[in-house]
Amino acid sequence: MFGRAHNTRSWIIVGLFLCFSGLLLFRLFSLQCLQHSRYSIRARNQHQSTNYLPPHRGRIYDCRGNMLAASVPSFSLYCIPRLIEDDQVEEIASTISPIIGIDEDRLCRRLSGSGWFVWLKRNLREDTAAAIRELDLPGLALKQEMKRVYPKGSMLSQVIGFTDIDGNGLEGIEWKFDRQLRGHPGWMVTEKDSKHREASWFRSDNVSPIDGCNLFLTIDEVVQAIAEEEIDKVYLEYGAKWASVLVMEPSTGRILAMANRPTYDPNNYSSSDADQRRNHSVSDLIEPGSTFKVFPAAGVLDAGLVAPETEFYCEDGAFKIGGRLLRDSHPHGVLRFDEIIQKSSNIGMAKVGMLLGRVDLYKLLRKFGIGDRTGIELPGEVGGILRPPHRWSKLSLRSITMGHEVSLSPLALLTAFSALGNGGVLLQPRIVDRIESPSGEVIYRYNRKEKGAVVSSDTARVMLKILRKVVMKGGTGRRAQISGYEVAGKTGTAQKLDPNGGYSHSLYRALFMGMLPASNPRFAILVVVDEPHPYYYGGVVSAPVFKKIAERIIRYMDLEAPEATEET
Amino acid sequence: MPVNHLKTILILLVSALLGIGFLMIYSSSTMYAADRYGDSYYLLKRQLIWMSVGAGLFLLALHIDYHWLQRRSRLLLLLGIILLISVFIPGLGHSGGGARRWLSMGGVGLQPSELVKYLVIVYLADLLSRRQKTINSFFSGFLPPLAVIGLLCVLTIAQPDLGSAMTIGVIGLLMLYLGGARLTHLGCVALAVLPVLVVLVARVGYRMRRILAFIDPWADPKGTGFQIIQSLIALGSGGPLGLGLGESRQKLFYLPAATTDFIFSILGEELGFAGTALVITLVIGLVIVGFAISRRADDLFGSLLAQGITAMLALQAMVNMGVSSGILPTKGLPFPFISYGGSNLIVSLMAVGVLANIAAHQDSECRYQRGRRQENWRIGDGGWGMDREEKGRGGRGPKS
């Protein structure tokens, strides 16, 4: 009897084991076959990660292929607070604080918590990244990113603009051409271990990024450097509010240089203010003052109403017109048409303007593109302000001929002026020459674009001849004269609008625009110095800047002095 | 059926489990070993050494008559108790995972409780086979073995190693049950142990949390439920056929103890339901073969010893699988022959050697010895002999 019981007991134990095995099989069948898809999703959520591979943002070059902006790989440090034990936080913080230069308290706050991703420091230097990799601290990781660098620092900074830390273009060319420059990120589907390290042997999709297109500007780095240097000197010397230089090729509309002061370093854009980042050449509306006289004069000449020798009585410096007294800075008696421009007589110019009449003057100025945007490939360009004739007051005509009651950007002014250097045909100014794919094929080229003839080529030639006198003896722009070269230019000293109404008698804007050689202009330069002290005449402040820049460009371009055309 | 076929099947089953175990340790340990020791094969090499040592001891046990154990059962138990106590001796004992479970000797860690699990089986098999007549008596038959079990449990709990203590307790009671102890006695013990167990669990925070996590792992998926959830993800994502050998993701430090207590989950992830079902089948095979050997054992000691060893191996395997698949609360028991770990592997292989030896004793080569033993047999349990007679295998009484 007992023996039976014993035997039965063995069977019961075997039976229990079998039952439990059955239970296990059932459970495993349920887990592995019935709920497989559910757990697969959980597993994938846990293991898989898609990494975006940053593309190289397109580079920006000058017209000769000098690099102005480029993207380089860099490493950024982030932490995974979830993987850091509370008691490790302070130790880690004190270890890396001196390396990355963030104070310990801030680091502690970022390291603690339960997140999966917190940036600690972006775009580390190579050696810093290596030092951190060496430490191999828990919960810290490096991520490869692209860093935008501007090797030329502040040069051309307002034109190029900059990108934010994530590579989005924020200003200038970087903003305007963001879509062309940015490229397409690639991606990589991979799996990671619980410490967020990649298990590379499980990597599946691996799609390379498509790099952005490269941009070639019309800017010539050497000309730009010259412009930057010279404008910097005058900006500092005269304590100006701002200053700007534009160099343009009249025959093509290409901009060779565009320099602004104050300036900033786009590599460190966050420490700059809006004024430093402002591209005054295209974003500021200025009243051009006497430089503007060139346009009505050209119009009158073109209409055949005057000849250079036509004489005007300049009222000995005081002329009552429209109930207001108009004055010249130096009284003149009778002046020839070309002398009016040479000496920049307001009274003479008012009389010249009256010959043309309101409507014709307005039409002419519109043909010069005044009142419009030039359409340059830069953001933030302002249009001009030129009211239609029916809204002009009695004084408007004479004001406009002297460059008041009209405002335009420095770029628009130089563009209009360059038309005279291009046989009277207005061109669209260009700053981007072409867009190239990463492999170097040209995707798009910005060609020379004519906007229409403004004056006849004869008029243009005569006008330039007259303007040569401005820099000669008796002219307002003598300081712009370059011996041996035919400089055609025009000074301008614009009274600034007083915030309290009317024109200020202490705030001026000194301008000089000129081109050379007058017979076949290779380049045109506009110098604008805003609120210079203590001197404020365009002929005194801006003309010498023109001269220095032009001389250096002549040497750079190796222009030959035309023979025997010198007239002093 | 020739008995040595059982021995062959046993060896084949164990070899199969060892082979699977070796593959799984290879797969699950390389990343961990590379990360921790800088050598991908560090754990694998060690396991290979343990395996060779285990194989040697297996052969030794196979060739030593298991009655050698019977004669020295009390001495062996004493040795076991000394080993358990020596864990507490500073310099000898070694902590791991918050408990003093290890004996460190020349850089090699040994876990005495692993050995004690089997020594208690040997001791009880001997005691119960000798005291069949008094087993029904509470004081002279039931209490002495119970006291020994109790002492061993207390010593292991003190380490603290509740898992081993429970294993020893369960296997001890199982031996008493198989040895013919009264159900009323066993029932009383079970009733008395239950509140002690509850107190032991409820008083220690992590044990309680494990129980709670078992009931609802998703209540705290980042904390205590983490391990079980990761284990379920491993098994579940494996699917019917698995991700393929070496393709486990969960071994990338998601699943803690992936080479030891939770190696079965990695197996399920890589080999799928096909793999887990195969392993369960092998374990069932082991149970059936083990009990078949016990049924054909020469004497009651051999029979009880065979059942104890088989139950011990199966119990650990079942609990391990039960924990991995979430039907038992988290309790770190290794999977014999599959989990990484030297002590368990060596002791398990030794135990299988003894089991094979019991099977081999039914061989014709041992006819003489068998005849001698069967005399003892009759004293103990007539029923066993009847059973053998029914099978038509050998007669009762001496053959001479």
Image (cartoon, coloured by chain):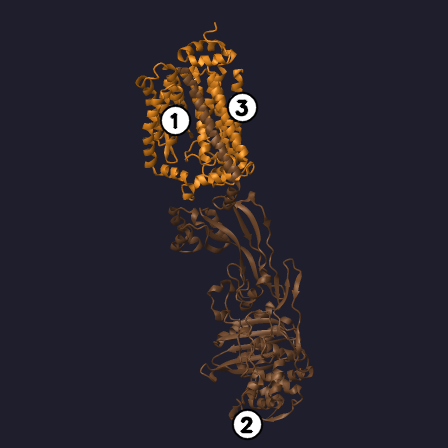
Chain colours: A brown, B orange
Residue pointed to by mark 3? B12
Residue type at mark 1 is Val
From the top left corner, tell me how far across and down residue A218 is, in percent.
62, 68
- Left or right, residue B291 beside residue B163: right
A49 to A524, vertically: above or below: above
Q: Is the residue under label 3 in contact with that under label 2 (CB below 8 Å)?
A: no
Subunit under mark 3:
B
Instruction: Say what secondary structure mark 2 lies in.
Output: helix
B280 to A59, vertically: above or below: above
Q: Are marks 2 and 3 on the same chain?
A: no
Residue located at (62% from left, 83% from top) = A363
Residue A316: mark: 2
Image quadrant assignment for residue B79: top left
Q: CA distance from mark 2 to mark 1?
A: 127 Å
Instruction: Say what secondary structure mark 1 lies in.
Output: helix
From the top left corner, tell me how far across and down residue B193 is, in percent.
33, 28
From the top left corner, tell me how far across and down residue A192 is, in percent.
51, 45
A166 to B170, vertically: above or below: below
Q: Is the residue under label 1 in contact with that under label 3 (CB below 8 Å)?
A: no
Q: Nearer the viewer, residue A31 or A107?
A: A31
Subunit under mark 2:
A
Residue pointed to by mark 1? B170
In this view, the residue farthest toward the left is B139
